[in-house]
Image: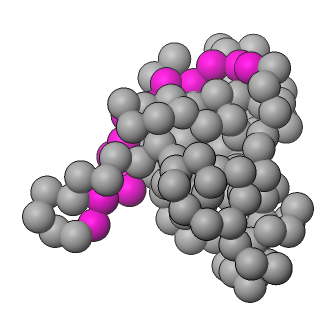
Amino acid sequence: MNFVLNTGRTIKQGSYVERKNSDGYRDEASACRMNPVDMMELDLEDGVNIKMSSPAGSVVMKAFSCQSLKRGEVFVSLGPYANHIIDGETHGTGMPDFKTTMVHIESTDEDVVPVSRLMEECGGWPYED
């Protein structure tokens, strides 16, 4: 099923900014908030693993219902999981499209990988503890 991805900061994600290798940061940065009806149509329960894909890549996250989201929209906090699927094209502005990326979501048995592995997969260095 296809969705429009919106990204942004969350208070919880920001509280872990100095501890990006922590389980808490991984849990918040890899959480995909979805409209409950969309989750029902995909037969998803809160906390199950999903694979989110875009033309730029794919990443495994956990799905959570959020009543305030409109159907067809999903939200992921800014960070390495969102960055894994956001195209680097900036259209000359210096800022990628963090608000309008089209993504495909499906259930998966794959695991959510640690932040350090995501960083290595995209050619970066793991965060220091």
Residue 76 appears in the rendering = no
In the shown orientation, is residue 53 left or right of residue 18? left
For the residue pair 127 and 111, the one nearer the viewer reads as: 127
Q: Is residue 96 magenta?
A: yes
Q: Nearer the viewer, residue 69 or 47?
A: 47
In the picture, measured across the screen, residue 1 lies left or right of residue 88, that is: right
Q: Residue furthest bottom?
A: 18
43 with respect to 45 (left or right): left
Which residue is pictured at 74% across the width and 20% down the height? Answer: 108
Is 13 a magenta residue?
Answer: no
Residue 45 position within the rendered picture, expressed as x and y whole percent measured from the top left? 83, 27
Q: How is the image coloured?
A: one colour
State which quadrant residue 90 falls in: bottom left
Picture coordinates of residue 85 (x, y %)?
47, 43
81 to 57, vertically: above or below: below
Q: Is residue 20 above or below residue 120?
A: below
- Please give the name of the residue rendered at 70% of the width and 40% of the height, measured from the top-left corner: 61
Estimate the x, y position of residue 49 in percent, counting from the top left.
Answer: 78, 30
Farthest residue to the left: give it: 92
* Spot occupied by residue 63 in the image (x, y as percentages of width and height): 73, 37
Q: Quadrant of the C terminus?
A: bottom right
Q: How many marks?
A: 0
Residue 111 occupies quadrant: top right
Q: Residue at x 72, y 57 (%)?
A: 115
Q: Is residue 10 visible?
A: yes
Query: What residue is shown at x 39% (from left), y 37% (from top)?
Result: 56
Boundaries of the magenta span: 95-108
Q: Is residue 126 left or right of residue 113?
A: left
